[in-house]
Image: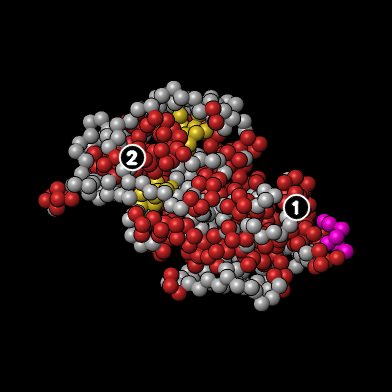
């Protein structure tokens, strides 16, 4: 792993480049690129050109007809996706998006401006598919597709988290994330991919989840958290697995099962479902809510999304509740209807506790656990003691995919305000629609990419630092498993003293369960406010 400079050593130079962007060579610096996909993972999901190679090599071992493959792939997508052709043609390079990308703000590299990142592909489009580009060449912003261009694509299409913040500010509505998605699809056609994406895709395809957890290990981990909950409050929750005839299938990111602090969020799920007597089951086969296919290709996204619905049909449930995950919800809300849906074999979700019908899920038949919990609170179905979270001063990070992709702003804040007494918003230009990315989404949360991760995380960290200094905020809440994992590192780097939590960890802390023993600790085994002396006496 490349050594990461200390925060005060991280140079960020926003200045005019010495050469034009077409003449600026590609440079693979340590900490700015990700390891390529491994042979075994490419073969597992039938991706082309599996071989050993490195971006540092002169020869990337591409197929002999690589150029034809890329141009035919682009031609096919231009024909298939009308939006792509529009995005290629209508950009006037006004620069409204330029300073909206966290990677540009954190690196100062002009090729991380969304307009220029898209231009990497658009310039080839002009040369090969427009008359002006064929005749005028560079004057029309066109250039030949060369090996150096392909290397440039690889570097910069994997320095984009597809967060879509830039699209919010584009006067023409160009979605540069969709350009990045297509760029990655094209690279995949000739075997150029990163293992932190391909590995989880292969694991999910064969084992049902990104981490490759086998069914027995998945169950064992959840059983472990059952014991942990009993140790906290004396209540023995009773989850079931692969149970046919359950009313609801619950699916959450595998990161909640194996990675702190997501594990505490998972404990909150278990406690909530037990307390309301929900008739639900887990699947050890569709044991992943996330979808790294989104970062690979539209076809791979479709393949991985289908497993959840296949399992729902096999088990005979009525509908699905999904856990706190980012890209799962972007896939469900933006792609499901035309990709795998509509899921007509399931019912429109209706809460068995409140009777609320979730009309927004009429087609997908899948609702977000936060909207489910918000409905329970709104209807007075939970007994909550928010003072149990009084040791926390909380702010909320709008995870890009649930926020920008599905407009999910109010329910998370409603839940937090009902389980916490101390909540503080970050500046308005950094939240909700304009939220900054965690800096490591779309499969970029890998250690060898750490310097770029910290650079990309700087804008979000600055907003957290503001409320940390003004309101003494010490906890950052979010509803995305990747955010929970990567923001922990980002906060340690940029804003020491601020932790990261999922919303349902806060719910689990505040939830007063029937038959519980006296609570002295939160789900992290830290003393509850006022219980510090009790803990000291026990020691």
Q: Residue at x 48, y 36 (%)?
A: 368
At x 36%, y 49%, the residue is: 394
Residue 101, position as x, y percentages in the image? 57, 59
**Residue 477 sits above or below residue 17 on the image:** above
**Whether residue 68 is visible:** no
Q: Pinpoint residue 326: horizontal percent, then vertical percent.
A: 51, 46
Q: Which residue is mark 1?
A: 90
Q: Secondary structure at mark 2?
A: helix
Q: Which structural element holds mark 1?
A: helix
For residue 32, above or below residue 236: below
Query: Is residue 293 visible in the rendered structure shown here?
Result: yes
Dominant secondary structure, magenta: helix
Residue on which disc 2 sits: 419
To which quarter of the image does residue 219 belong? top left
Q: Which mark is residue 355?
A: none
In primary-sequence order, the first of circles 2 and 1 is: 1
The answer to whether 132 is drawn above or below residue 384 in the figure is below
Q: Position of residue 7 (x, y in %)?
A: 43, 70
Camera-nearest residue between 457 and 13 = 13
At 52% from the left edge and 61% from the top edge, which residue is drawn? 456
Q: Where are the magenta residues, as a range? A: 129-135
């Amino acid at each position: 792993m490349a050594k990461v400079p200390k925060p005060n050593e991280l140079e960020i130079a926003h200045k005019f480049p010495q050469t034009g962007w077409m003449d600026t060579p590609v440079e693979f610096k340590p900490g700015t690129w990700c390891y390529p996909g491994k042979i075994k993972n490419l073969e597992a999901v039938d991706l082309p050109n599996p071989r050993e190679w490195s971006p540092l090599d002169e020869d990337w071992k591409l197929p002999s007809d690589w150029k034809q493959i890329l141009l035919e792939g682009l031609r096919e997508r231009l024909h298939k996706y009308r939006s792509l052709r529009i995005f290629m043609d209508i950009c006037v390079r006004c620069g409204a998006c330029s300073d909206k990308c966290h990677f540009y703000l954190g690196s100062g590299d002009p090729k991380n401006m969304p307009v220029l990142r898209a231009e990497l592909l658009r310039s080839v489009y002009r040369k090969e598919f427009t008359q002006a580009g064929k005749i005028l060449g560079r004057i029309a912003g066109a250039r030949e597709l060369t090996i150096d261009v392909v290397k440039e694509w690889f570097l910069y299409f994997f320095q984009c988290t597809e967060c879509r913040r830039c699209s919010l500010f584009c006067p023409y509505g160009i979605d540069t994330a969709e350009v990045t998605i297509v760029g990655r699809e094209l690279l995949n056609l000739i075997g150029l991919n990163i293992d932190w994406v391909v590995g989880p895709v292969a694991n999910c395809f064969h084992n049902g989840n990104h981490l490759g957890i086998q069914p027995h290990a998945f169950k064992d981990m959840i059983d472990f958290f059952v014991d942990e909950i009993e140790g906290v409050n004396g209540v023995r929750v009773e989850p079931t697995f692969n149970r046919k005839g359950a009313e609801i299938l619950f699916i959450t990111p595998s990161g909640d099962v194996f990675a702190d602090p997501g594990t505490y969020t998972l404990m909150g799920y278990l406690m909530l479902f037990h307390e309301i007597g929900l008739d639900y089951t887990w699947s050890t086969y569709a044991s992943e809510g996330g979808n790294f296919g989104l970062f690979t290709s539209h076809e791979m996204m479709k393949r991985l999304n289908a497993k959840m619905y296949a399992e729902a049909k096999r088990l005979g449930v009525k509908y699905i509740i999904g856990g706190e995950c980012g890209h799962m919800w972007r896939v469900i809300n933006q792609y499901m209807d035309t990709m795998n849906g509509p899921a007509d074999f399931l019912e429109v979700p209706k809460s068995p506790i409140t009777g609320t019908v979730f009309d927004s899920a009429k087609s997908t038949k899948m609702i977000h656990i936060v909207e489910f919990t918000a409905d329970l609170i709104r209807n007075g179905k939970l007994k909550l003691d928010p003072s149990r979270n009084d040791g926390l001063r909380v702010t909320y990070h709008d995870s890009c995919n649930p926020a920008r992709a599905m407009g999910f702003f109010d329910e998370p804040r409603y839940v937090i305000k009902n389980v916490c007494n101390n909540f503080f918003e970050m500046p308005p230009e950094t939240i909700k629609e304009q939220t900054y990315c965690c800096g490591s989404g779309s499969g970029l949360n890998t250690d060898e990419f750490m310097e770029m991760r910290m650079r990309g995380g700087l804008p979000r960290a600055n907003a957290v630092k503001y409320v940390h200094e003004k309101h003494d905020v010490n906890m950052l809440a979010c509803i995305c498993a990747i955010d929970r994992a990567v923001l922990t590192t980002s906060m340690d780097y940029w804003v020491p003293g601020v932790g990261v939590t999922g919303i349902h960890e806060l719910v689990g802390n505040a939830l007063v369960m029937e038959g519980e023993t006296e609570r002295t600790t939160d789900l992290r085994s830290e003393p509850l406010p006022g219980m510090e002396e009790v803990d000291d006496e026990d020691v």
